[in-house]
Amino acid sequence: MQIINECIIFFIFAIVSAATPHRATSQPIILPDLLAPESVAADRHHLYISQREEIFVHSLKDYSLVRHFGRSGEGPLEFKLMEDKPLRLFVEGPDIVVNSWNKVSFFSKPGTFKTEMRITEPNSTNYLPLRDHFVAMTSRTRDGNRQRVLALFDPSLKKRKEFFLRNEALQKNGKINILQKSFEYTVYRDFLVVAADDTFTIFIFNPDGTPRHKISLPNYKRRPFTPGDRQQYIAVVKRNSANSSLYNALKDRLQFPEFFPAIQIIHVSNDKIYAVTWNQSGQTTETLCFDLDGTFLRQISIPLGYQDPFTSCPHTIANQTLYQLIETPDGAWQLHISTL
């Protein structure tokens, strides 16, 4: 496996040490049909928004609504949520791919139903097309610890190969490592891009699951997790708990880190990998940009909004643009657009 040389990356980083500012391209746009949007995806022509079991498709030309479909159920245009997790929308290829409870649905753009496939592998989710097959995440228990596993599936969604695993945040001692993600992943062209571990590490895999290369910044300065962060996290847990007894059951199981993870989320678009970090300055969030070979390109300060200190607003990066949905004080949802 090729490992991108850290010294080279930081030499380039020093040359472009000043973070590139964003440029707002327009005034925020009210999208009146939205009540509680949960995820955003975009291609060259459309913006795709999920809200519970509904999907809204807006034109990127004038941001008008061009398609609205989906409702609760198990039919061709119906979805069931996975433990109240948002629908996962994947629009990198020619189709809209929607992951919901126990099935993967396919729609032509901008939203005509084509087909659906039932998921038979237990505890698997987030199926993404990768060349002529799929990659998905499964879960299992080993020695009392929960693990998340990346696996390849054939065109009929039968598992063929496991190739990457990490422990989950909840472990056999009952402790919950807050902010810990097993990994997150996306597909771009014939690349599988995976961000894993608390350190700054991004893995790029070939379509057959073999390693291609790795971006590693072992000396990256992660944001300290302060006592103030701890109090804010507890306040969020209390606010989101259905009742006080639920919080009391959780509070002694929370395990707080010394530092935030290096990477918050990744986006891949226009032959670039955008690693959104937890380092923040004022109203902006640091984002490091690499090409697909792992060469560092630049640092960007993006105006990413947050629903709470640990949850970013629904957003995506595509077309060298940050698209995000931010709620106004009166409950309306605005589309904010910033050129990167």
Image (spheres, helix red, strand yellow):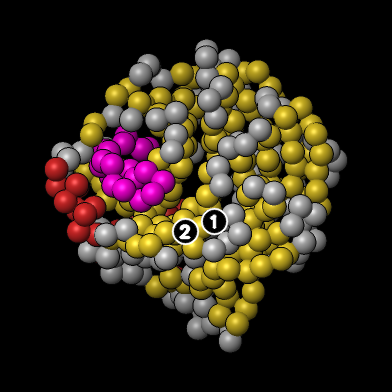
Q: Is residue 218 above or below residue 309?
A: below
Dot label at residue 212: 2
In which quarter of the view is residue 238 placed?
bottom left
Dot label at residue 255: none
Spatial separation of the CA atoms under disc 1 and disc 2: 6 Å
Classify 10 Å Cα crowding around label 2: few (below 14), some (14-19), many (20 and above): some
Is residue 305 highlighted in magenta? Answer: yes
Which residues are the magenta region?
286-307
**Is 140 positioned to the left or the right of 72 in the image?**
left
User: Residue drawn at (14%, 47%), measured in percent from left and top?
Assistant: 14
Asked if marks 1 and 2 touch (Cβ < 8 Å), the reply is yes
Q: Which residue is mark 1?
A: 206
Classify 10 Å Cα crowding around label 1: few (below 14), some (14-19), many (20 and above): some
Give the percent coordinates (x, y) of residue 319.
Answer: 44, 28
Give the percent coordinates (x, y) of residue 196.
Answer: 44, 62
By secondary structure, the bulk of the magenta-drawn segment is best described as strand
Q: Is residue 59 above or below residue 98?
A: above
Q: How many marks?
A: 2
Between 336 and 190, the residue placed more toward the observer is: 190
